Image: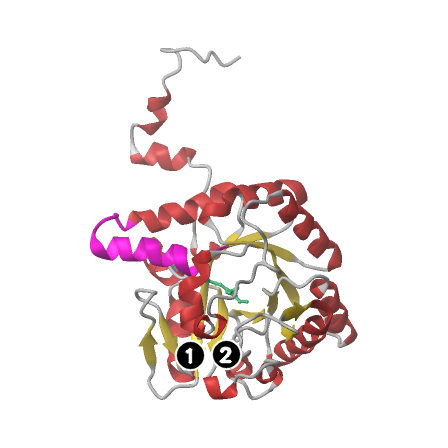
């Protein structure tokens, strides 16, 4: 029996040297755990820095391929692609999402050709393409669930055709995972993975992302609270994840990350399925800006990611993926 009594037990013994701390460490963070989100845009400049996301750029396709190559060299195995669409191509229905010549489809095909091994994650939602900035179809001022789901099925199929390994519905419509799974199966995309944003909260931490993809200006003061979850709730996250798994999700995700690790832990414990977490734009920017100002040590980024692992996340989408990978490799 363990005698939990001082001085037989001195918990500091296993903290005395770095090597012993490493030996007893329960969680490890490696490049296998990191997924890099990347912004792409139809632009003549190679890359343009996003003002509210220090160190993160919008890339044109040439620069995007170059960036992916450098990620592969750092050992990153997966990227999530997000487009900033030119205002002239946005409309009420987000119809450019279904255009096989859109920049996401081009990027997926281009990546498959150049780097067939990298895992390509493509977001399913209409917000980069709609002139109102919502994730779905607006009918009488309301985001219509079932009509949106039909479009999302088509969007998902197009993304699968274009070479996406993982389809990631981030729209939070009800029933979309089943609809997308049915579409993929009936079109013989048997191995296409669905990563559902199962518990996606209506969060102010998404602000910088909306700048990056240009949906912020359009969305204005409108909120996404009629489809994204209330951040006061936990049970609902389990309900969402359970339904998505039944509907055919292979991996579920919680978003945002750091402030929502109780949700990650609860979902992982309840379902024991692959569970990812998204350290979103606002979380990244808070930490990165503080690091750049010298207010926080740079190790805070790795700490925040390790905490995601400790909570039960199998992998993490983070804008810091490249930077952390290069630290881990040095
Ligand atoms: C849109 C989408 C959002 C993010 C990923 N997909 C923003 C939103 O819901 O408005 C946020 C990611 C981030 O903040 O890094 N469907």
Q: Are dots 1 and 2 in contact, CB under 8 Å?
A: yes
Q: Residue 77's spot in the image, x, y percent?
A: 48, 64
Crowding around mark 2 (Cα neighbors within 10 Å: few <14, some 14 to 19, many 20+) is: many
What secondary structure is marked by label 1?
Answer: helix
Instruction: Point out which mark residue 111 bears.
Output: 2
Q: Taking 120 as reference, is 110 above or below it?
A: below
Count of labels shown? 2
Residue drawn 30% across and 35% down? Answer: 18
The residue carrying mark 1 is 65
| Residue 75 appears in the picture as rendered | no
Horizontal and vertical percent position of residue 118: 51, 70
Majority SS type along the magenta span: helix
Cα separation between marks 1 and 2: 7 Å
Rendered image quadrant of residue 276: bottom right
Q: Is residue 62 left or right of residue 266?
A: left
Within 10 Å of disc 1 (Cα), the crowding (few <14, some 14-19, many 20+) is some
Q: Provide residue 100's location: percent of width, then percent of height.
A: 60, 86
Magenta stretch: give its range.
278-298
Reply yes or no: does residue 150 show up in magenta.
Answer: no
Q: Residue at x 63, y 62 (%)?
A: 172
């Amino acid at each position: 029996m363990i005698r939990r009594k001082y001085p037989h037990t001195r918990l500091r013994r296993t903290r005395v040297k770095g090597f012993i701390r490493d030996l007893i460490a329960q969680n490890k963070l490696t490049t296998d755990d990191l997924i890099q989100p990347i912004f792409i845009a139809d632009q003549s400049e190679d890359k343009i820095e996003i003002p509210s996301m220090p160190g993160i750029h919008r890339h044109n396709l040439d620069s995007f391929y170059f960036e992916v190559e450098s990620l592969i060299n750092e050992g990153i195995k997966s990227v999530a692609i997000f487009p900033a669409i030119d205002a002239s191509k946005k409309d009420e229905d987000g119809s450019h999402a279904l255009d096989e010549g859109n920049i996401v489809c081009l990027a997926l095909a281009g990546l498959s050709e150049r780097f067939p091994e990298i895992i390509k994650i493509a977001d399913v939602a209409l917000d980069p393409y709609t002139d109102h900035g919502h994730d779905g179809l607006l009918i009488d001022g309301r985001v219509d669930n079932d009509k949106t789901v039909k479009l999302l099925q088509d969007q998902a199929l197009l993304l699968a055709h274009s070479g996406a390994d993982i389809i990631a519905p981030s729209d939070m419509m009800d029933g979309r995972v089943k609809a997308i799974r049915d579409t993929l199966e009936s079109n013989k995309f048997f191995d296409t993975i669905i990563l559902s944003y199962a518990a996606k909260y209506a969060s102010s931490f998404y602000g910088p992302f909306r700048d990056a993809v240009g949906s912020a200006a359009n969305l204005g003061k409108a909120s996404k609270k009629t489809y994204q979850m209330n951040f006061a709730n936990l049970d609902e996250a389990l309900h969402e994840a359970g339904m998505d798994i039944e509907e055919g999700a292979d991996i579920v995700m919680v978003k945002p990350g750091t402030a929502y690790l109780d949700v990650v832990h609860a979902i992982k414990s309840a379902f024991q399925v692959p569970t990812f977490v998204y350290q979103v734009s606002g979380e990244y920017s808070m930490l990165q800006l503080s690091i750049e100002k010298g207010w926080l040590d740079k190790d805070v980024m790795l700490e925040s990611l390790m905490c995601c692992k400790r909570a039960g996340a199998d992998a993490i989408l983070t804008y810091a993926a490249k930077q952390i990978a290069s630290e881990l490799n040095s």
